[in-house]
Amino acid sequence: MNPLHLVVLAAGKGTRMKSAQPKVLHAAAGLPLIEHVLRTADTVSPSSVVIVVGHQADAVQSAMASRPNVRFARQEPQLGTGHALLQAEQALDGAAGTVVLLSGDVPLLTPATLQALVSRHVETGAAATVLTAMVDDPAGYGRIERVDGRISAIVEHKDASPEQRQIREINSGIYAFDLQPLFGSLKQIGSANAQGEYYLPDLVRIYRDSGLTVETVTLDDPGEIFGVNSRKELAQIGQLLKMTRNDALMASGVTIVDPATAYIGPDVAIAPDTVIHPNVYLEGRTTIGSGCEIQCGVRIVNSTLEDNVFVNSYCVITDSHVASGARLGPFAHIRPDSHVGEDAHVGNFVELKKTTLGRGAKANHLAYLGDAVIGEKVNVGAGTITCNYDGKKKHQTTIEDGAFIGSDSQLIAPVTVGKGAYVAAGSSITENVPAGSLAISRGKQINKEGWVDRKKS
Ligand code: UD1
Ligand code: CA
C-alpha cells in the first residue's frame, strides 16, 4: 500500500505570455493548460492533488474550484521551484507514500509516461525519481550529470559550465518523491546560484550526499515534456493536442476531411461514419451521431445531433438538440434551448431561439422563430417572423401540426395558429387562428388602371 499524491506547480508568472491572465489558464485545444495536466493526473487515481498557486492565485483557484479533491497551497512570493514544492508541506501533513510533481504548463505528458514514472519509483524504492529526456537543443533546461551512469546532480543552464552545457540529457521538471525525507531535505536547499532561486533540482545532489537513492526514467519522446512559455508555444502545443485528438477520432471511424482545420474539443463524442469537413469547430459537451455530415465552417457548442443529420456550411448551433434526419443550413443559427425534430428542415438565414420545430416541419428561408412551439409538418414560409418581444417581456407562439404560414407573415405573440390552419402571405397575425381556418390580414390591393399615363400628362 503506497498512497500516491500529486503536486502541480502553477505559481509562476509566465512573463513571456504578456498576458493579464495566468499562464496555466490559457487554453490549448479547448481546455486550460492546467486542466490537461489534471486530466492526465486523474489517470493514476491519486489520493490527493495539491495545486501550488501564487501569481494571480485567486484566478487560478476559482477556475479550478469545481474540480473534486483538489486543494491549494499558496506560494507568496515565488522564490523558485524548491520553495514552491515546500508550500505543499501543510497540505500533505501526515501523508505517506509517493508524491509526483507536475508543472501546470506542461500539458502533453501522457498517462503512460506518468504511470511509468510512478511504477519505476515504487519498484526501485528510490527517494527520488527524475523524468529526463535526450534532446537535440538542450538550451535553457537543467542538465543531468551522471557518474558511472548514475545521476549525480542537475545543473541549471544559467549555472552550467561550457562543458556541462554540452550535455544533451535534460531535466523535465517532473519527478516522483518518497514523502518521508522530502520536506526536511527541501529546507536544506539554498539560493546561492545564478538566479538567486531555491532550485528544486538541487535535491538530487543533497540526496546523493546523504546516501539516498535517486533514479531516472528517460523519455523516448521528448515532445511530451514541452512547456508553454509564449503564445507561439501555446499555438504549437494546441496543434499537437488537436492532432492527437483527431487521430483518435479517425481511428474510431470518423472521417475528417482536413484534420489540420477540424477543431474538436476533448469532451465531444462523434459516432462512426460521420464526416467532418474543413474549418469545423465542435465544442463543449457536444454529441454527434453516426452518418452525419458536418459541412465546412460549422460551429457546434454543447449540442446533441442524432444520426444522419446534415448540417450545411456556416451554421452555428448552441445548447440545442437536433433529431435524426434533420437538415440545417447553409447559414442557419440555432440558438440555445432549441429542438429541431426528426426530418425537419431549417434553411438559409433562419434563426431559432428557444424553439421546438416538430417532426418533418420546414422553415426553409429567411425566418426568425423565437419562443415558439411548432408542430409536425408545419410549413413556415420565407420571411416569417415570430414577434416575441414587446419591449418588456417575451411571449410564446404556438403553431399546431400541419399549419401553413404564408411568406412574409408576422405572428405577434402570444398567439396560436391552430391545427391545419392557413395564414395568408403578408399577414400580421394578432389573434389566435382557429384550426382548419384561413387567416388573412393585409391591405386590400387596388389597381388604378391608366394611372401612369395620367400622371405623365
Ligand atoms: C525548470 C527546472 C529545469 C528543467 C525545466 C523543465 C528548476 C530550477 N529548473 O526550469 O531543471 O529543465 O524546469 O521545464 O526547477 N514555479 C512556481 N513557483 C516558483 C517558480 C516556478 O510555481 O517560484 C512553477 C512555474 O509556474 C512552472 C514550473 O514551476 O510551472 C517551472 O518553473 P520555470 O521557472 O518555468 O522553470 P524553468 O526555469 O523552466
Ligand atoms: Ca525559472
Image (cartoon, grey):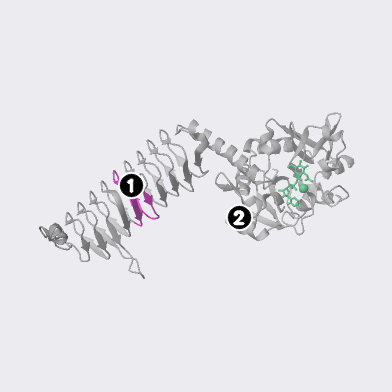
Q: Which residue is mark 2?
A: 64
In the drawing, what numbered circle is on residue 339?
Answer: none
Identified by mark 2, the residue type is Met
In this rendering, the answer to whether 369 lies above or below 157 is: below
**Between residues 457 and 142, which one lies in front from this camera angle?**
457
Quarter of the view holding residue 74: bottom right
The answer to whether residue 253 is above or below residue 329 is: above
Q: Which residues are magenta?
A: 332-354
Which quadrant of the figure has residue 212? top right
Q: Which residue is mark 1?
A: 348
User: Observer-nearest residue: 441 or 44?
Assistant: 441
Secondary structure state at the residue bearing disc 1: strand
Residue 48 drawn at (x, y percent): 66, 50
Q: Is residue 163 highlighted in magenta?
A: no
Q: Residue 425 location in percent, x, y?
A: 19, 55
Question: Looking at this rendering, what residue extends furthest in the left direction?
Answer: 449
- Crowding at label 1, few (<14), some or many (≥20) Cα neighbours within 10 Å? many
Residue at 82% x, 50% y is 198
Asked if residue 45 can be seen in this view, the reply is no
Residue 102 location, x and y as percent?
A: 70, 45
